[in-house]
Amino acid sequence: MNALTPALSAENFLAHYEQRRAALPGDPAARDAAASYLRAHGLPGPRDEAWKYTSLRPLADFAPADVAPAEPSLPDLGALADTPRLVFVNGVLSPEHSRLSSSIRASLPATPGPAADAVTALNTLLTEDGARIAIDPGTDAGLLLLIHLGTPHASAFPRHTISLGARARLTLLEIAAGTGAYLHNAVTQIALAEEAHLLHARLQTESETAYHLSTVTADIAERATYDSFTLTIGAALARTTMHASLAGPHAHAALNAAQRLAGQQHADFTTIVRHAAPDGTSRQTVKNVLDDHARAVFQGRIEVAQIAQRTDGYQMNQALLLSDRAEIDSKPELEIFADDVKCSHGATVGALDEDQLFYLVSRGIPRPEARAILIHAFLEDALAAIDNDAIRTHLTGLIESRP
Amino acid sequence: MRIRLARPVGGVVLFAIDLSAGAILLAIDLPALLRGEAAAVGGAVGGNLAVDVLLVIFSAGCFAGRHGAVADAVGDAGLLIGAALPDGIVAVVRLGGVVPVVINGVADVVLLAVDALALLRGERATVCCAVSADFAVDVGFARFEALGFSGGELAGLDAVGDALLLIHAAIRDGALGGGLLGKGRRRDSQGNCHTTIPSKPILKGITLAIPDGEIHAIMGPNGSGKSTLALVLAGREDFAVTQGSVTFDGAEMLALEPEQRAQAGIFLAFQSPVELPGVGNANFLRTAVNAQRRARGEPELDAAQFLREARAAAKRLHMPDDLLKRQVNVGFSGGEKKRNEILQMTLLRPRLAILDETDSGLDIDALRIVGEGVNALRGPTFSALVITHHQRLLQHIVPDRVHVLAGGRIVKTGGPELAEALEARGYAQVIAEAA
């Protein structure tokens, strides 16, 4: 992006920051640096290559304001209702809703880190709270829920950090939900030490008028595994950016996703996988089911450094378009400097198969049910990659309850 | 950016795309692939228009089906080319009949997806072309019609050529370079369904009454309209019924949706059952049985009840135990697919079963098992229409009446002895005698 590129104004957020500055916790230096960044660059516009398909214009017009404290109710957690959980309301921890077990240490608040892009800078500018989850080496911390609830007109900027010591294990289900029009801009920084294993399931069921921005950065050490799955169902406008850095040999990252959109929804799933050490493996299966005027974006970048020999990368993006007006934009990018590498990627787009539909209805299955069966079948191999029965059942139920 | 040439040389289709910074050329012997034979693939890559040509030969011998043969064979070719390129990355994916070929060179990416099977059927097809520099990929679609081609393999070849010319024109006119870039659009499924052969009447007046409890056979040569009749009865919307009526149990069927006809008790055993990847066979069968029970106001079966019944029925049909656990028809042999149709019929207990060439592809044992499956349902409230080329299935399922269908009309009706006469003297003679 050069200086001449017209960008969107971040003025609303900067003004809000000036008002709130004295009340915000922690060291103001990082926030001031973020403010400088936003004054100089604004929000990214369509000329910015990383934002070619997703417009943040609605955000430039969003007026952040203080809202009265609210106590929204939790979404239906089904069989996961008794699982330990951290619950944030409008970016701030809600002790009443939270339920912690002794095996997880969570200390708050997190301190803002430096900003490398506008979305992270916005978070840095205004973050108030966040989870800091640290799992001791060799500990299996089991399953934890990290829930964020938004309420009408709120703007929330939680900043989470998750670190797993050597050989530690954690299964984390993140849920974003809420009511009314609000902005939820979360930044999550993850560090996995040697042989650590994090299963990170992410469920985005924001209200249909909400804006959802999330940025995840995962640093993966030798023989550690970052296994993520992102299910996007909600929000009017959503952008998820995931950075996975395979920093040690034999590291593994999975950035799988499913997006089920309808109406005027727009959802963008952008990944950057950096293979910076030899013998790493990365897997991305991204499935989109789009109805009405919905639009989905997948941008997947795989970088293989010269040192990262014997890298094995796989990326697949598939879309099932249920309407003539739905749209998918797919942009795979591969940048490979090593010479002994196995990388593959592919993209498909199609409609429901009329022969398959006829087969189902000819057995007496009503057409809407037959469509649902085929949609579920399309998503099946992405869902099957979720290596936790309780979470997979919960997410599958949510997809099936969509019309 | 320009496309240099796209021309058939013998049976080989040359895809040639010439970018400003590099060139990729891919030649695949499509007709050989479709015959399931080994085919040669030539790939040429170049930077700054210096073209290197390499040739790889691969074998399609290990591919089972026609669809799979094309997609997988092309895939393997792509992988071989990929291995030959020092920094190349190749991936091939398949959806329905679309064969996208993705080639990723050092500085450029070219993606070509051609619905080869649609082309060979003489139908319209969608061609997807993506070109890029510096790894930013934009996807454009060009849609073209295979109009004017007489059908068969040559139509496919020329149509592929035309597709590239259209892409060329679109790039020249800026359509692919500008407006269409970055958009993946839904294939126009209606448009794709139209065949370019002008519509012609297939069934030309069929009067047929099947009393309760009777089994009728329809025999006839290829192209006589047998399968069309089966699909029209089951409610397939691809065919326009211009006149007449279909009454079942006193009710008019033509106004009903396919699912309503099934719920009324009509069952079609498909000639070529489709595969449903991602759908479990047991779940599918239970969903179907319960949908019909619901429609009739009967209580639904729970999973355990259903499984007991399904396992017993599968055992009677000598089907392997794991067949219920597998995905519907995926990886099934031809005989297993047909037996799976009979299993569905057994569990759904239709009052009219239409068997569309259920005998094709069955060995002698499977034929007997299918016959037993149908005979087990025989009774005063079960009737069947058995469509077949051959008399041998009718030795197991002895029909009450045999009808000969030719040119969209029933030309002769008789008892079981008519099937034997057809077997002995051939269709041509029997049809000539009837005329």
Image (spheres, helix red, strand yellow):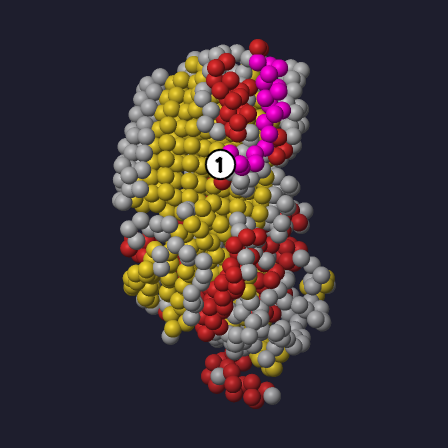
Apparent side of residue B133 relative to residue A233 in the rendered image (left or right): left
Tell me what residue is drawn at x 45 percent, y 17 percent: A132
| Residue B428 image offset from top left, x and y in percent | 52, 85
Q: Is residue A360 visible?
A: no
Apparent side of residue A282 relative to residue A264 in the rendered image (left or right): left
Please tell me whether residue B257 is drawn above or below residue B367 in the rendered image: above
The answer to if B410 sits in the magenta stretch is: no
Please tell me whether residue A232 is drawn above or below residue B70 in the rendered image: above
Q: Chain of mark 1?
A: A
Q: Amino acid at mark 1?
A: Met
Give the residues in magenta: A1-21
Q: Identify the element where label 1 is drawn.
A: loop
Mark count: 1
- The residue to which callout 1 is attached is A1
| Residue B411 image offset from top left, x and y in percent | 61, 82
The answer to if A3 sits in the magenta stretch is: yes
- Would you identify the image quadrant in which residue A77 lies? top right
Please tell me whether residue B400 is drawn above or below residue A338 in the rendered image: below
Tell me what residue is drawn at x 47 percent, y 31 percent: A201
